[in-house]
Image (tube, rainbow, N blue to C red):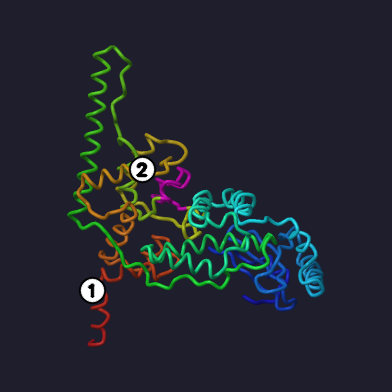
Amino acid sequence: MKEKLIERTVRTAKPEAKPYEIRDTDLKGLLLRVQPSGAKSFIVEWKRGQRRTLGRYPVMTLEGARRAARAALVEADTHGAPLATINKRATKPGTFGEFMREHYAPHVEATAKAGKFTTALIEKHFGYLYDEPLTAITRAEFDRFKAKRLKAGTNPATVNRDLDRIKAALSKAVEWELLEANPLLGVKRIKREIEERVRYLSPEEEKALRATLELREARFRQRRLSGIAWRKERGREPLKPITGYADHIMPMTLLALNTGMRRGEITQLTWADVDLKAKRVTVRAGYAKSGKARHIPLNSEAVAVLKQWKKQQPVGRLFNLICTAKAWGRLMEKAKLDDFRFHDLRHTFASKLVMAGVDLNTVRELLGHGDIKMTLRYAHLAPEHKAAAVEMLVR
């Protein structure tokens, strides 16, 4: 957005889900960048894609930023770039791999929840360029990479995420003045319709899933009783019988079914996020996919599940784990549910709400969708609303 930067504008600029910039209309090239965390920085841009950070507000004042920006723009006009940038270029990393290992990886792993995962995927897909100059990734190079991935049957959404990751890394190289311009700046994501796959449990399938969970719990309890008897016969210290849930699978599954939370959101929850008295759970902005916090009311089953689980896991994170793939795969096999992922519990939650007549905007708020287009995937499940709409014409 463009606006005259005055002290009040800078002071009252509110953070949003994604970073945004305000371009000063008085001094062309001066920008204020606002992060989702609320951090604000002054930036000078002397050419499209070529910029440097001047300082952070309020340590640097608006007047100080104007002076620094004017000086940098004068130097850029004379020398092609500010002198500080020219001096830094002499020490910039030679290869893309050096940049990733020495600069980007330490930064993103320290500041992003999925930082290690991000750097691992960049190395997996673009590792063949690690020994090449930092400028080796060009539009043409990415187009070749994209064509190869699509030809191999990779989902366009996955290719888009590949682009997002590498684009973000190169943008940081520009911000840190290690690269003159981001070569992928104008590369667009593959346009596609919102994924149509909405796999949710039918009433019969949900019944089968719940029955399988109960059988699994009973099997674990029986194993524990057998173990207790075996140890008693041999004079060993006895184990305690299972009095609550056998492990995390059943409470996590029931919580997802009743709240629509993503697996990553559930595994990040701490008891500080749960208010059993108010019957509400808070998904913090720090681990919400949208970058925005949301509050989800808890129904009676979710409350009962959490009360029992708190007796077993009273402090810290509710579910202190990383992967549930093996246990979930075995559960699906026992329940005879085909092509059903843990994430599809979220689809089941949303689909049941829509079929019960809940409006799509409420469903969007509960799911934490940043765009109503994502929620519209469930619209077809409420055909009676469309029928009622056209019936209004007759009335």
Residue sitting at 47 percent across and 62 percent down? 161
Mark 2 to mark 1 CA distance (whole Å): 35 Å
- Residue 179, placed above or below residue 103: below
Q: Position of residue 359 (x, y in %)?
A: 33, 68
Q: Is residue 226 left or right of residue 173?
A: left
Q: Secondary structure at mark 2?
A: helix
* Element on which disc 1 rests: helix
Residue 335: image location, x then y, percent: 21, 47
Name the foreground residue: 270 vs 300: 270
Residue 116 left/right relative to 323: right
Verify CB contact (< 8 Å) between mark 2 and mark 1: no
Question: In the rendered structure, which amino acid carries the disc numbered 1?
Answer: Glu
Question: Residue 383's spot in the image, x, y percent?
Answer: 24, 73
Farthest-out residue, bottom: 394
Give the residue type that dot 2 points to.
Leu
Q: Quadrant of the N terminus?
A: bottom right
- Find residue 306 and name its label: 2
Percent from the top left, x then y, of residue 352? 27, 61
- Which comes sooner in the sequence, label 2 or label 1? 2
Residue furthest top in the image = 235
Q: Nearer the viewer, residue 43 or 217?
A: 43
Q: Which residues are magenta?
A: 264-283
Query: Which residue is label 1 attached to?
Result: 384
Closer to the camera, 16 or 54?
54
Rendered view: 298 above or below 152 = above
